[in-house]
Image (cartoon, rainbow, N blue to C red):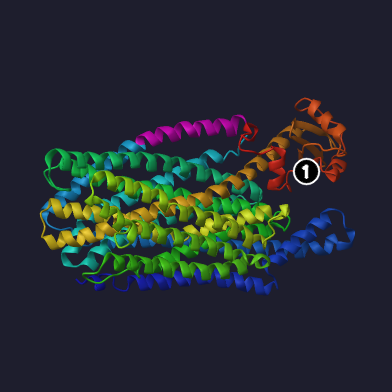
Amino acid sequence: MKLARSFGWTPRVLVLLTLALLWFPVGNGFAQGNADGDKPAAAEKGDADKGDADNGDAEKGDGDAAPSEKAGDESFKSTAFNYWLITTIGSLIALGFARYFYTWMMKQDEGNEKMVEIAQAVRDGADAYLKRQYKVVGVFFAVACVALMFVSFVLGAQHPLVPFAFLTGGLFSGLAGWFGMKTATWASSRTTQGAMNSLNEGLQVAFRSGAVMGLTVVGLGLLDICLWFGALYFVFEGSMSLAEITVTMLCFGMGASAQALFARVGGGIFTKAADVGADLVGKVEAGIPEDDPRNPATIADNVGDNVGDVAGMGADLYESYCGSILASAALGVAAFHEDGEAVQVNALLLPMMLAAAGIILSIWGVFLVKTKEDTSQKNLLKALGKGINYSSIGVAVAAIFLANLLLPDNSMLFMSVGVGLLAGWLIGWWTEYSTSDEYAPTQAIAKQAESGPATIIIAGVAEGLYSVWVPIVVIGVAILLAFGFSTEWAFGDADKFALGLYGVGLGAVGMLSTLGLTLATDAYGPIADNAGGNAEMAGLEPIVRERTDALDSLGNTTAATGKGFAIGSAALTALALLAAYVEEVRVGYDRWAKAEVVDLPDGTVIKLNNRAVAARHGDSTHTYLVMPARKGQGTDDYDAIQKAGAKDEIEIDTDALVAVGLLVNNETATIPDFVQLYDVSIMNPAVL
């Protein structure tokens, strides 16, 4: 059966089904919005009116307002549910297409008996590695989970769901790595067999097998986030505030980070150890070619390629992908805390919906990747770049639509997403330029081989050091631009600081929105490399080895591009996560205050520590941050707070001290307030 026919009508049917599933909740949301004469901002206004009525504004007419407020509340939650449904469907579509590509790959010819035997040896080695690694990871997660349970259930310092969020983050990351490794090891001999027919068929098998890893990572990551948010917000409605929900979900990202540490570092060490060992035995001691069947270390070398660049890279980018979405959600809730729950929910859902749009467009990009016979590596790179470029443009268009739909008063947020997309593209382009043998840097290094090994090592190290300046500048400029677009260039406005960091988070989401496709190009590398090794060890015709070498050379460049992409996205995600950590501190203070004042009479103010006090006003609890005292700003009250012991009752007027700036309400405190509170600097250990 021809390769072109082997896909049949299935992709087109699935795409049509995807559009139908997406249109139902979107159309339903628009219909409800029109019926209510409402936008998200209108629901926000309803919440504000409700707050005024609760504060005793009789002119609002509590009795008349209550039904309309209730209707508005139901309307925005129904629309929010539809948006959440879109993201959930998007994650399931990713997993569905991952299954489709896996099934298609398994139907391809696996080759002759020798090729099957070699591929099986690599599979056995990969299985042995994963089983050993996951045993160690399992012990770590068990110990960490017990520690988190102690902190949550005994000390009460974390929400009781935190340990379970931590576990699911690690579990889903491990599952993604396992599925990716299984696919890669099954695909190598099939790629070799495809290369026997044509270069394009070999590319198709390897790339679509890599797409299984990419789509599994984004599908499982987004699905886990959707399930957690759906359970905490819609199923257990009202049991947690939006800030508590996002902070709890952030711990899911911590589990993914822990799994990434083992997979990336452990896998990377195994990869290089196996690679160097195989080269020492084959090229130095025995004087035989690479991937020679007489060298038993070649199997370990092929296993290592999959361990490092499939399971390891997948876990690394899975953590960045989930971290960017979760951090943006937490920062969105914080940035719009004065605008009502409806706007906060929309800000929370925006990064999730961007990720869902990226999934659909990544799948489209996979089908765009194809090449001709006897083509150059530059044209092979263009074939991969075509899918990525078209998908990125599609995400940029989707960002314009989604930003205007969810946050019409902050519609320039789509530019922050565009900045992230552009930054990712620039990092990928520069990495390709620096590592591909089609361009001057690599050719100049190769020329140094005429002088000897010393000069080529020096040239390689020098070029490596020189090449990093572009990604560093791109990341720095991207952070500033994403911040500036989201705040409309109000860099000095402390009230918009959280909004600016929300824009940076959206930039990270934009950069990673096409991860299903970009990770496919990275996972493609070890599959093509293994295919070349399989062809060499099986003694196939030279034309097959030439084709697999072309695919392998392309894979080396895409692997380097993937590493640059991973580092760039991690930088943006890390900044967003650092800002989101403030929300952890904020929620922690509130939880502490509620536990301490629950049985105290109305009007009581007690000291939590030197930086915070808690007050009971009626049925509600308020936490106040104690800012450093300045001359004329309640220095006597500040001294009284510092001299009091923990849990001591304090006689202070909280409203008056808020007015002079000594106390700041924890709920409305900005990131600059926390910076001032903790006297943040690089050398200040009190921050920890």
Residue 614: quarter of image:
top right
Q: Is residue 656 above or below residue 340?
A: above
Position in image of residue 462 (x %, y %): 37, 48
| Apparent side of residue 188 relative to residue 37 in the rendered image (left or right) | left
| Apparent side of residue 542 relative to residue 683 in the rendered image (left or right) | left
Question: Residue at image x 67%, y 54%?
Answer: 335
Position in image of residue 602 (x %, y %): 84, 37
Amino acid type, callout 1 = Val
| Apparent side of residue 64 relative to residue 176 in the rendered image (left or right) | right
User: Which residue lies under the disc numbered 1?
Assistant: 664
Q: Is residue 536 above or below residue 75?
A: above
Residue 300 colored in magenta in the image:
no
Q: Quadrant of the N terminus?
A: bottom left
Q: Which secondary structure class fits the magenta region best?
A: helix
Question: Which segment did they paint magenta?
Answer: 135-156
Residue 301: quarter of image:
top left
| Apparent side of residue 497 relative to residue 654 in the rendered image (left or right) | left
Position in image of residue 458 (x %, y %): 32, 45
Q: Is residue 259 above or below residue 341?
A: above
Question: Residue at image x 30%, y 61%?
Answer: 207
